[in-house]
Amino acid sequence: QVQLVESGGGVVQPGRSLRLSCAASQFTFSSYGMHWVRQAPGKGLEWVAVIWYDGSNKKYADSVKGRFTISRDNSDNMVFLQMKSLRAEDTAVYYCARDPGDGSWYLQHWGQGTLVTVSS
Amino acid sequence: QSALTQPASVSGSPGQSITISCTGTSSDVGGYDYVSWYQQHPGKAPKLMIYDVSNRPSGVSHRFSGSKSGNTASLTISGLQAEDEADYYCSSYTRSSTLVVFGGGTKLTVL
């Protein structure tokens, strides 16, 4: 059974940085693209970023471009989201999700999420 | 404002069928067969219900079906059950630099 476990969330002041982690297990991690998706309190889903299976390509939502960096460690089965210059509007539950690994564009498996609160 | 447009809410009685629409453009929904649908119960992570427009993952009830016509995709739930009450989100690949877009979500109420 695919497992994705996010960690690293918490309360952070505006302008500061935070690094989220997602530990993957029960599948061949290096064969799949990984995404981050967030959900502000009471709001809908917002796609944040994707990293290719081998880390060769990364894409970001316009709202986080230049501030967030997605990365992965295929030897440790981990994907990360480095968040800088955080703003109040970045407050959300952050989910990591796995793609199907066949070139299609859907999120087949999701973690349980980690809450990031940006507040002074 | 979300890139894909969904109705904010829909409702139906047990046993009835409902359809949720998801309208985009030729740059996303209309241009690719990469539309997916997710169900989310309160406080839970989203769950994939439909992928590539009309495919059901293993374990998802046959009561859920997807389709697409032009720039609008649809999720139909037949034989509504109480446990279907949830938020539903559509998503699509987009040729823009962001690659993935979501709809604003639709709250399904089972009366």
Image (cartoon, coloured by chain):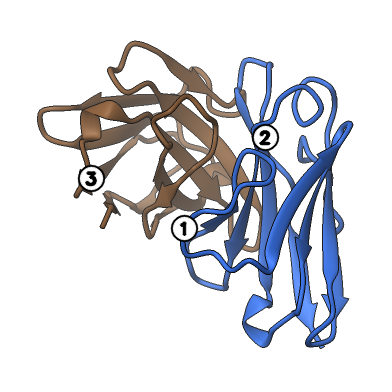
Kind of residue sitting beneath label 2: Ser
Would you say B95 lies left or right of B21 here?
A: left
Report the mark closest to the observer, 1 or 2: 1
| Furthest residue in direction front, as rendered | B62
Label the brown chain with its letter: A
Chain B, chosen colour in render? blue
Q: Nearer the viewer, residue A119 or B2?
A: B2
Q: Is residue A109 visible?
A: yes
Residue at the disc numbered 3: A24
- Marking on residue B58: 1
Left or right placement of residue A58 versus residue B8 in this view: left
Gap between marks 1 and 2 measured at Cα: 20 Å
Residue A97 or A9: which is nearer the viewer?
A97
Frontmost of labels 3 and 1 is: 1
Whether label 3 touches label 2, CB < 8 Å: no
Q: Amino acid at mark 3?
A: Ala
